Image: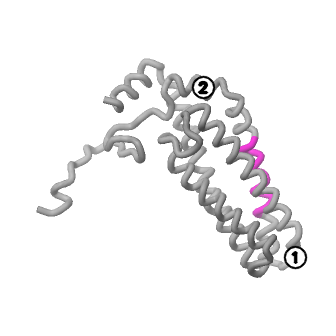
């Protein structure tokens, strides 16, 4: 018997979720209590302000980095923009961690946002590598800019993850509360 034969089949149309969820069962992003904490937390507003700000800083910085790589000009402006982007990133990560603690009771890696947090750590690592290169004098200008581009590529994936979760939360919020609770209880059983 092959390994494939031993695996239980997944019915068509059944979703298979990740960390903290059983195969074939989906868990709502928020329990009723978590939704209340999310809606009442000032940190939700802070995240809502910082996320688009970070995206705007990213767009400006991306243009400056691409200009520097393609023309060799504007290196100082590109470096400043990446440092600003990194500071905004650190700010949103710290406040996001506080938000996660308030809503889910964990500083990071709550089941509902596990993979988003994993990618956030990679984004942080690449931005920090860039700062190390800049302030430590490691590598060439082009190498530094390429590290910034790698950080930005992972950031785009991470931003898409969060936008997807925002959409899921909105769709979930449109469901009647009784249906959300029944779904959570079914997964817990």
Front residue (pair 188, 171): 188
The quarter of the image holding the N terminus is: bottom left
In this orientation, does residue 131 appear? Answer: yes
Q: Residues within 10 Å of mark 1 (few under 14, many from 20)?
A: some
The reply to whether discs 2 and 1 touch (Cβ–Cβ < 8 Å) is no
Extreme bottom residue here?
A: 140
Q: Is residue 138 left or right of residue 21?
A: right
Quadrant position of residue 164: top right
Identify the residue at horizontal 83%, vertical 78% (top origin).
71
Front residue (pair 111, 101): 101
Front residue (pair 159, 88): 88
User: Circle 1 sits in a helix, a strand or a loop, which is it?
Assistant: loop
Magenta residues, start to end: 50-62
Q: Position of residue 183 (x, y in %)?
A: 38, 27
Marks 2 and 1, how far apart at CA: 48 Å
Q: Is residue 29 left or right of residue 63?
A: left
Q: How is the image coloured?
A: one colour
Q: Which residue is mark 2?
A: 37
Q: Is residue 66 left or right of residue 80?
A: left
The quarter of the image holding the C terminus is: top left
Determine the main secondary structure of the stretch shown in magenta.
helix
Identify the residue at horizontal 75%, vertical 73% (top origin).
133
Identify the residue at horizontal 66%, vertical 65% (top origin).
126
Q: Which residue is mark 1?
A: 73
Decide whether residue 61 is among the magenta residues.
Answer: yes
């Amino acid at each position: 018997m092959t390994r494939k034969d031993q695996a239980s089949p997944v019915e068509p149309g059944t979703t298979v979720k990740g960390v903290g969820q059983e195969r074939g069962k989906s868990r709502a992003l928020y329990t009723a209590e978590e939704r209340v904490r999310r809606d009442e937390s000032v940190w939700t507003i802070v995240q809502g302000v910082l996320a688009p700000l970070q995206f705007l800083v990213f767009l400006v910085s991306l243009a400056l980095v691409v200009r520097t790589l393609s023309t060799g000009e504007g290196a100082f402006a590109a470096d400043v923009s990446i440092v600003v982007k990194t500071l905004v990133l650190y700010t949103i990560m710290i406040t996001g961690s506080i938000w996660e603690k308030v809503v889910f009771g964990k500083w990071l890696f709550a089941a509902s946002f596990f993979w988003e947090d994993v990618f956030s750590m990679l984004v942080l690592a690449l931005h920090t590598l860039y700062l190390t290169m800049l302030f430590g004098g490691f590598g060439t200008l082009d190498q530094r800019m390429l590290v910034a581009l790698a950080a930005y590529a992972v950031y785009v994936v991470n931003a898409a993850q969060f936008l997807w979760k925002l959409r899921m939360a909105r769709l979930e919020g449109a469901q009647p509360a009784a249906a959300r609770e029944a779904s959570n209880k079914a997964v817990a059983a």
